[in-house]
Amino acid sequence: MSVKLNLRKDELIAIVEEMGLTVPDKAKVVDLKALIESSDVYRDDIELVRNLTDNILEEKREKWERDKRECEIELEKIRLDQIEKQLEIANATRDLANTSQATEIVESGSLTDNLESLIKSVKTLTIPVPGRSESFNLFFHSLEKAFQNRSVPNELKAEILFNILGEKVNNLLAYVSQEDLCDY
């Protein structure tokens, strides 16, 4: 009764070495099979050759499973690293948003600088304050366009308008409440 030697070259080389035979240089699969089948060990103790074959195949399968587990572990490590990086990005984004909000609150000096630059740019974009009441419609229309162009927040619109109108509205502040100013 013979043993089927449908094995790969590296497996056949391992069997030949386990049998105590020497592996010829540049041996082909056919040569290795012929070497095993013509050996005394194969003829005298075929059960030993079966056991060697089974052991080598079992070792190969165990090595393959071990490598597969290591690859899965590596893949999980990579996924964990990706999740950690995403968490870092989310934290950095949140911190940046918190920092920018804190900067807006803390930097009131820069807010006044920003307000002054907004006033200047809106003045540049609007027509001069008219002397006659008939021209105020055109003035307010150009003012609204300038506010849209510069993306002026609603809270600042009344203050910019007062600044543009100047002395013409000084006494108006005594008669208007803060709520009315926000809804200029």
Image (spheres, rainbow, N blue to C red):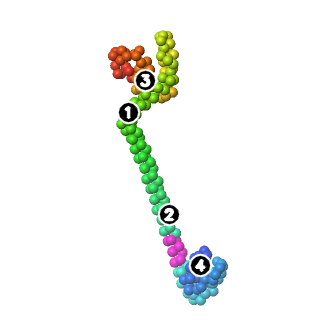
The residue at which mark 3 appears reads as 160
Helix, strand or loop for disc 4: helix
Q: At 37% from the left edge and 38% from the top edge, which residue is drawn? A: 102
Q: Earlier in the sequence, mark 3 or mark 2?
A: 2
Q: List the residue tagged with mark 1.
A: 109
Give the distance between the C-alpha atoms of the residues marked 3 and 1, in whole angstroms.
17 Å
CA gap between label 2 and label 1 equals: 57 Å
Instruction: State the mark number for residue 71.
Output: 2
What residue lies at 45% left-to-right and 25% top-to-bottom? 119
Circle nearer the viewer, 2 or 1: 1
Whole-number angstrom distance, CA of label 2 to CA of label 4: 27 Å
Are the two marked residues, 3 and 2, in contact with CB atoms closer than 8 angstroms?
Answer: no
Quadrant of residue 160 in the image?
top left
Q: Is residue 67 found inside the magenta-colored segment of the image?
A: no
Magenta residues span 54-63
Depth-wise, is mark 3 or mark 2 nearer the camera?
Answer: 3
Q: How many marks?
A: 4
Q: Earlier in the sequence, mark 2 or mark 1?
A: 2
Q: Amino acid at mark 1?
A: Gly
- Disc 4 marks which residue? 12
SS category of the residue bearing label 1: helix
Amino acid under disc 2: Cys
Upstream in the sequence, badge 4 or badge 1? Answer: 4
- Amino acid type shown at disc 4: Leu
Image location (x, y in percent) of residue 101:
39, 38
Q: In this view of the protein, can residue 148 be seen by the observer?
A: no
User: In which quadrant of the rendered image does the N terminus lie?
Assistant: bottom right
Q: Main secondary structure of the magenta part?
A: helix
Residue 142: which numbered mark, if any? none
Q: CA distance from mark 4 to mark 3?
A: 90 Å
Q: Is residue 137 shown left or right of residue 181?
A: right
Would you say the residues marked 4 and 1 are in contact, meaning their CB atoms lie under 8 Å apart? no
